[in-house]
Image (tube, rainbow, N blue to C red):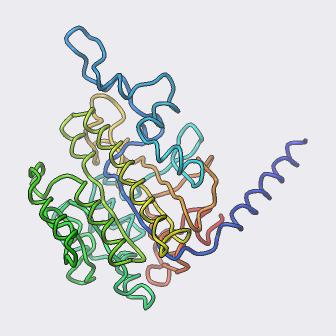
Amino acid sequence: MPRIAQAIVISLAFVATTGAQQAPARNVVIVTIDGLRWQEMFGGADSDYFQKDGKGEATAVERLYVRPTAEERRALLMPYMWNDVARSGQIFGDPSRRSRSHVTNGLWFSYPGYNEMLSGMADPRVDSNDKVPNPNVTVLEWLNTRPEFAGKVAAFGAWDRLPFILNVDRSGLPVGTGFTPVPSPKTVRQREINEMAKDLPPVWDYGTFDAPIVAAAVECLRVDKPRVMYVMLGEGDEWAHRSRYDLYLDATQRADRFVRRLWETLQSLPEYKGTTALLLTTDHGRGATTKDWTDHGRKVPAAESTWMAAIGAGVAPLGVRESVTVTSSQLAATIASLLGQDYSTASPKAAPALPGLGGNTR
């Protein structure tokens, strides 16, 4: 078949596939995995980053995660991402596919990254991780003002900056954080989750591990039935800052398992099965060498690069996207678009939705 004809056939197939998948989702769940590098996302564990034993041999942890090919390593590290999302959804940011995903805020650390993702644009006023209320109205806050979503938006994350990122004093959004994963417990199970969080070691000054946060999110789906939920996972970034590549990988594999748990819970509930989209991404990247991988920020240019993924209602099954560049700022409009909403009415400067998701087939 001539190349021009072949290109036309591929283009028509893309249009047909995206067109058939673009009915709005009824619900959207967003999960961010703080500081997960694209290098591990697309290539799995890297032997160069492991500490060796006294004889220079690979340790048990390295043998656990390392395999001959990138495809094997990444599937071992993140089996849900590569066995489910890659086959039934979309993944952006794989350099080997001439694809790029990146932040636009120029700062390459957490609060500016979360603001960019959730408000749809970078803002020079958001230039630190300080506990300062976000001056921007996030897409979560905006959706909560819409009649069909009012009181049906929830957020969970151990990091104690999350209430400020979502400006809870203004937005009124319920946010579970730190040692109180369930902000207003209604059931015995929810009270037990809060007690579990208090019983765990305070590994970070703001709270404990991600597990209670995920448990709270799962119980919220069962009890409160939100239409929009945001879950912030953060363990991997903490271990990376401590130069623990082994625990960074463990946290990554655990995050993948948490995402699977959320998705399986959604598919087990009639309110969500077949009508829910799941969006996955990170707030920033990290350094690209063994010397700077633990860090990010202005002095680490490689931390600009990220990744994004999606599966579920309104998401065409296009797999790992090729020859496309996306930005973190496109997440906010994507959330709204998947729900059949136009975020540009509230934030004209926000970036457009991701291509091939929701109503955007560009």
The residue under the point 50% across, 79% down is 344
Q: In this rendering, would 101 be left or right of 259?
A: right
Residue at 34% x, 85% y: name it. Answer: 151
Image position, residue 340 (x, y; %): 56, 79
Point out residue 57 in the picture as x, y percentages from the top left corner: 29, 12
Task: Give left or right: position of 341 versus 282.
Answer: right
Between 224 and 228, the one nearer to me in the picture: 224
Give the position of the C terminus as an image quadrant. bottom right
Tell which residue pokes out farthest to the top in this image.
55
Q: Quadrant of residue 355?
A: bottom right
The extreme front residue here reads: 188
Q: Quadrant location of residue 145?
A: bottom left
The x and y percentages for residue 241 are: 21, 41
Residue drawn at the location 85% of the way across and 43% of the way down: 3
Q: 15 above or below 205?
A: below
Does residue 171 appear left or right of residue 41 in this picture? left
